[in-house]
Image (cartoon, rainbow, N blue to C red):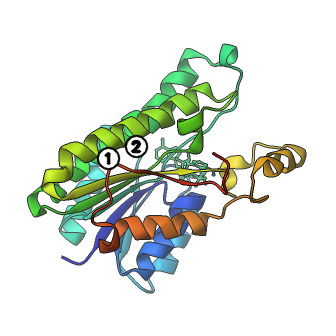
Amino acid sequence: MKKTALITGASGGIGSAAARALARDGFRLALCYNSDEAGIKRLAKELNKSTDAFTAKVDVSNRAQVDSAFEQAAEEFGGISVLVNCAGISQQKLFTDITEADFDRMMAVTVKGTFNTCQAALPFMINRKRGKIINISSMWGVAGASCEVHYSAAKAAVIGLTKALARELAPSNIQVNCIAPGVIDTKMNSCFSEAELEALKNEVPMGRFGSPEEVAALISYLASEKSDYVTAQVIGIDGGFI
Ligand code: NAP
């Protein structure tokens, strides 16, 4: 089977950069999006010049939609060898202002979403005794962020899930790792004002934000045979922030 990857959040900044990097690495791609249909169609058109890519609308918190994307991948590609979980949402609120619905949505997309995609991917990987799962957490899942308690808690849960699953799957030669980005220049940070972004930038030892392409380079490494002995790791890419 040619190398195949399913990317959630492929319509986003990090996910689309990951898709371009994996296309260059020779992967066939299942590009999952949630709402940005125009964006994902543009990306698929671009990538279909060099590889096979199909798109699927998947709310990762919905197991039926997740299963259906993997079924399509099985039909079109014969399975999936790499799963990249880039889907995510953010929200800045004082802890006392976070509603039960805010909390439930954060957990549903971030934690249940990761659970859903990992469980749906495994049958393809276990059968072949080969596979890679790359989860995108956050430096805030490691350190905790003020006004992002539910986001930090959900991203910490992704780290716990990654480490535990990696140990369970190591005998099956499936590597599970987590990336913990710092502030990366994507639309996820469009909620901040110019002044807030400048203040945030000044807190980064390297004095700049990361680019989606820099995170994608790490994803490319973790998706490749070069990282076959790397598993259960949380790899920071944050300009020295943490
Ligand atoms: P982004 O550009 O806002 O992209 C977010 C992606 O998640 C989009 O593709 C979006 O799809 C998708 N998404 C949102 N809700 C979803 C759902 N319910 N089901 C499936 N997909 C859903 O943000 P990004 O910066 O690329 O973020 C990618 C990942 O990196 C996220 O997990 C984020 O938490 C993490 N991260 C980002 C930063 C940062 O500073 N940017 C730092 C640390 C960690 P649609 O656009 O199609 O709706």
**Of the residues tagged 2 and 1, which is closer to the observer?**
1
> Does 220 sit left or right of 39 as displayed?
left
Q: Are marks 2 and 1 in contact (CB under 8 Å)?
A: yes
Q: Which one is in front, 68 or 29?
A: 29
Q: Is residue 75 above or below residue 154?
A: below
Q: Amino acid at mark 1?
A: Thr
Residue drawn 57% across the image and 24% down it: 102
**Mark 1 surroundings within 10 Å by alpha-carbon count, few (fewer than 14), some (14 through 19), many (20 or more):** many
- Crowding near the residue tagged with mark 2, few <14, some 14–19, many ≥20 C-alpha atoms within 10 Å: many
Query: Within 8 Å of ligand 1, the CB of disc 2?
Result: yes
Among all residues in the image, which is located at the extreme bottom?
49
Query: Does residue 8 sit above or below 214 in this rendering?
Result: above
Q: Which is nearer the eye, 67 or 95?
A: 95
Quarter where residue 163 is shown = top left
Residue assigned mark 1: 117
Q: Where on the picture, by quarter, is residue 175? A: bottom left
Q: Is residue 61 visible?
A: no
Residue at x 37% of width, y 52% of height: 177
Q: Which residue is mark 2?
A: 60
